[in-house]
Image: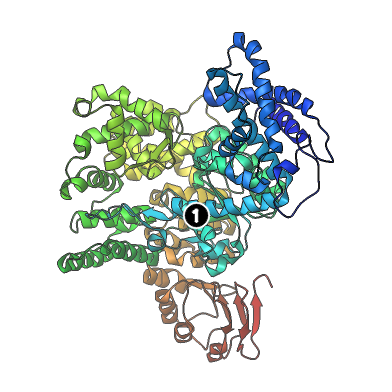
């Protein structure tokens, strides 16, 4: 708030407070007439004071009225109108002593209806005013009533509590309505919805801390933590997790690990909504994210929620803030948790946007969303097809869909390229949709995947559903892509992932004349509505704003626009900015060979104004782009390798993990680990295991015989990212067992470990049953068992008697009651 506005607001609040008697807290509604200070036994005002207060109030609220109506009171008529307006408002204030309302009912009426009650109670207030002045008085009356109701709310704890409770009930319903659905790409059967209930579509995501330990379900990883910074690549499900948490808390329907969040108030705060004004103050949270009923929140409500430690603050997408604004955002994430202790904070970002330990000083735990495991990919594919079956009645179509499901599952297991694409929910959804749409045929590579997805969403969907052109507009695919590219390019240039609806329409209007096929069918408003309603790529997340359904589509269309404009210098100039990485990689996939060479040479070239960290970033980005170039001059490829070879010897664990975003190409550049120290070998292991591609196994083989516990733990913890049997045979089977917990995530890994003869210390990270563990673990070898998942309450551990050498049992979650522990087994419970 502007300091001058704050001073004016405080002055108005003081004047309103003067109208009422000062009394202590109450636990019931109180008639307003008994509170006014100009009548009764304890009066502090007389009726002669009302014109003075009215005149001062007019001065205080005039600016508010001007801002709301965009009209100023004419200076020449002000002196003439002021006495009449003052008298009229004084009569209205006098009606506070006769109105038959209590404070709670008045607050629930709201300013407009409360002002109407005062107007009825003072019918002669406007009798000396002309029509224009009467309208001005009506605006003044409503503005003053808003301040009066704010005072009444703050004055009475009873009114405050009642209003807070009523608003929170409404707010919870609105949170569920806004977030309890997901788009599952390509499930667009005739008469079926474009989105699906969150419960039906949600797939539990896996997180890890530093990449060395086993993954754990996100709900389990978040349990008990009050400050978390969650990293995840594009499409990994960060926003989906935010939605899941918000809806679960709002409904009070929480999984067991998150019971501690019950009763909290969720604030969903997408960073892209903050614009450039920085992190909002609590009472501006709802208006900043364009919650449609933000004006209805009781004064000071958000402040009270946070002051009492009841908030769940879901700050989504730090990477969507302009880079120059992120330090201000970080300062807010330092200051607000300290100012309001006891609240729970979850902050999400793409990994490249913030460095490791970005919020460590503020005691934020850093978690990373894992790529989908094999089981996760299988579960997603089955969930997608189950959702697709909901509206199919023809048995032939059902059988055909089941066939597609099984062939797709086989394809992602067997085909390396598809396996590399199916690493997150977004890509899995596109693969499912395209596989069904193309009757079992799938494109290979990222460019082919997105081109096919655009074809499916922009043209084939409506045509194959035999839909008539809505509103008379029938645009083929290419004009739609051209228009969508204009919006995406505007967002790229302006550093935004959301734009005002007005700006979108104006942008289309500027470009329509150059696309005559679209211009002949309607104006910019009509074309905008068509793109919004029929492409499946745009949405209006709040009234008056528009964005792409997923940032990845925005990046891809931005890249298409840049390549068509041959604006490669534009890309090179911005290559040091992390939010341009995906655009540049996709541009390489789209560009012609000579253009790829120019772009990559530009990334390698020295720049006078470049900071060393930016120069390093550009060179690593050039390396990351190589796998996307379908055709490239061998000399250029060789130069990229030469310039980047020395950069892939990380000197810190942070740098080692950061190399993972480059992708499989980095495996070709990592140094031979045979002659390096254990410390460097650990960093190389961190980099290689960050690349979820079976080609990493060939490199990790050269690290498997190391005695270093850190190296061995890193290799053991990465098992689930690779082919189970091959990793077991080539890595797990060769690791020194001393002081090493061997992680098991699923039944397949349990069986593979048994084939290796078992291990003395085993960590179970997947929800396996006691029967499966009793059968799968090698009883004669097991001495220490770590159950790293939530086992529920009232846990009977008598089944552990089948392990005669078991000495230690570790439980990662506190349970209500643990019984049946065999004699001699020490139980260690996390947090106990």
Q: Residue at x 23, y 28 (%)?
A: 522
Which colour style is shown? Answer: rainbow
Crowd band around label 1 with a 10 angstrom C-alpha radius: few (<14), some (14–19), many (20+): some
Residue 656 drawn at (x, y percent)? 53, 51
Q: Is residue 362 left or right of residue 244?
A: right
Residue 402 coordinates in the image, percent (x, y) = 23, 67
**Viewer-proximal residue, 586 or 556?**
556
Expressed as whole percent of the image width and height from the top left, the position of residue 281 reads: 63, 39
Spot occupied by residue 234 in the image (x, y as percentages of width and height): 42, 48
The quadrant in which the C terminus is found is bottom right
Find residue 200 and report its image quarter.
bottom left
- Residue at 19 percent of width and 28 percent of height: 517
**Vertical comparison of 621 with 236: above or below:** above
Q: Relative to 766, is 94 on the left or the right?
A: right
**Which residue sits at x=73%, y=44%?**
155
Q: Is residue 769 above or below residue 87?
A: below
Task: State the residue in front, 200 or 102.
Answer: 102
Which residue is under mark 1?
Answer: 173
Q: Nearer the viewer, residue 417 or 527?
A: 527
Instruction: Give 338 or 756, whichever is nearer the viewer.
Output: 338
The answer to whether 634 appears left or right of 29 in the picture is left
Residue 374 visible in the current orientation: yes
For the point 22% across and 44% down, the residue is: 455
């Amino acid at each position: 708030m502007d300091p001058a506005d704050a001073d004016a607001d405080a002055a108005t609040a003081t004047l309103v407070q003067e109208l009422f008697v000062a009394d202590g807290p109450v636990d019931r509604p109180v008639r307003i007439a008994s509170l006014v200070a100009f009548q009764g036994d304890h009066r502090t005002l007389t009726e002669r004071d009302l014109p003075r207060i009215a005149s001062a109030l007019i001065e205080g609220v005039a600016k508010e009225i001007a801002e709301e109506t965009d009209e100023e009171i004419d200076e020449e008529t002000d002196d003439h109108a002021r006495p009449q307006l003052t008298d009229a408002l004084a009569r209205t204030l006098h009606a506070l002593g006769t109105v038959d309302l209590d404070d709670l009912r008045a607050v629930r009426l709201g300013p407009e209806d409360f002002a109407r009650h005062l107007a009825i109670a003072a019918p002669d207030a406007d009798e000396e005013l002309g029509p224009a002045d009467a309208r001005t008085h009506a605006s003044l009356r409503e503005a003053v009533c808003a301040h009066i109701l704010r005072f009444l709310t703050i004055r009475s704890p009873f009114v405050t509590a009642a209003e807070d409770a009523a608003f929170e009930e409404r707010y919870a319903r609105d949170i569920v309505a806004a977030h309890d659905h997901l788009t599952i790409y390509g499930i667009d059967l005739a008469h079926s919805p474009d989105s699906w209930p969150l419960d039906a579509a949600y797939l539990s995501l896996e997180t890890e801390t530093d990449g060395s330990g086993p993954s754990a379900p996100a709900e389990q990883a978040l349990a008990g933590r009050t400050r978390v910074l969650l990293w995840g690549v594009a499409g990994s499900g960060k926003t989906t997790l935010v939605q899941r948490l918000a809806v679960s808390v709002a409904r009070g329907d929480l999984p067991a690990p998150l019971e501690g969040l019950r009763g909290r108030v969720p604030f969903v705060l997408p960073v892209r909504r903050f614009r450039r004004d920085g992190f909002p103050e609590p009472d501006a949270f709802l208006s900043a994210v364009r919650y449609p009923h933000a004006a209805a929140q009781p004064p000071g409500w958000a402040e009270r929620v946070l002051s009492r430690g009841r908030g769940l603050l879901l700050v989504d997408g730090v990477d969507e803030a302009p880079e120059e604004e992120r330090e201000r955002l970080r300062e807010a994430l330092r200051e607000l948790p300290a100012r309001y202790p006891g609240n729970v904070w979850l902050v999400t970002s793409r990994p490249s946007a913030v460095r490791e330990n970005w919020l460590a000083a503020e005691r934020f735990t850093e978690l990373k969303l894992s790529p989908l495991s094999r089981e996760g990919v299988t579960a997603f594919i089955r969930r997608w097809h189950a959702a697709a079956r909901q509206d199919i009645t023809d048995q032939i179509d059902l059988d055909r869909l089941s066939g597609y499901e099984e062939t797709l599952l086989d394809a992602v297991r067997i085909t390396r390229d598809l396996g590399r694409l199916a690493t997150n929910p977004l890509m899995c959804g596109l693969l499912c949709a395209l596989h069904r749409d193309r009757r079992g045929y799938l494109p290979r590579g990222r460019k082919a995947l997105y081109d096919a997805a655009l074809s499916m969403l922009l043209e084939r969907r409506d045509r194959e559903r035999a839909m008539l052109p809505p509103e008379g507009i029938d645009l083929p695919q290419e004009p739609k892509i051209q228009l969508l590219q204009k919006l995406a390019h505007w967002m790229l240039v302006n550093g935004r992932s959301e734009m005002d609806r007005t700006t979108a329409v104006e942008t289309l209007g500027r470009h329509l004349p150059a696309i005559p096929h679209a211009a002949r069918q309607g104006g910019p408003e009509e074309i905008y509505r068509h793109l919004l309603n029929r492409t499946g790529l745009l949405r209006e997340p709040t009234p008056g704003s528009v964005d792409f359904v997923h940032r990845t589509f925005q990046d891809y269309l931005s890249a298409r626009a840049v390549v068509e404009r041959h604006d490669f210098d534009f890309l090179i100039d911005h290559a040091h900015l992390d939010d341009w990485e995906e655009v540049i990689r996709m541009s390489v996939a789209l560009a012609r060979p000579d253009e790829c060479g120019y772009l990559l040479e530009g990334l390698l070239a020295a720049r006078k104004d470049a900071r060393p960290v930016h120069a390093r970033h550009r060179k690593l980005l050039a390396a990351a782009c190589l796998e996307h170039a379908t055709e490239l001059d061998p000399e250029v490829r060789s130069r990229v390798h030469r310039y980047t070879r020395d950069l892939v010897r990380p000197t810190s664990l942070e740098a080692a993990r950061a190399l993972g975003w480059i992708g499989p190409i980095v495996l070709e550049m990592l140094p031979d680990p045979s002659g390096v120290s254990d410390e460097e070998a650990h960093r190389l292991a961190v980099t290689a295991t960050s690349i979820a591609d079976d080609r990493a196994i060939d490199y990790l083989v050269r690290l498997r015989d190391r005695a270093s516990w850190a190296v061995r733990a890193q290799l053991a913890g990465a098992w689930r990212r690779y082919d189970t049997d091959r990793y077991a045979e080539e890595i797990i089977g060769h690791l020194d067992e001393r002081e090493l917990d061997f992680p098991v995530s699923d039944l397949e890994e349990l069986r593979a470990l048994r084939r290796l003869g078992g291990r003395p210390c085993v960590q179970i990270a997947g929800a396996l049953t006691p029967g499966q563990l009793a059968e799968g673990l090698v009883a004669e070898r097991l001495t220490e068992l770590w159950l790293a998942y939530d086992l529920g309450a009232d846990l009977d551990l008598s089944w552990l008697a089948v392990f005669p050498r078991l000495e230690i049992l570790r439980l990662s979650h506190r349970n209500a009651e643990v019984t049946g522990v065999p004699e001699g087994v020490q139980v260690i419970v996390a947090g106990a």
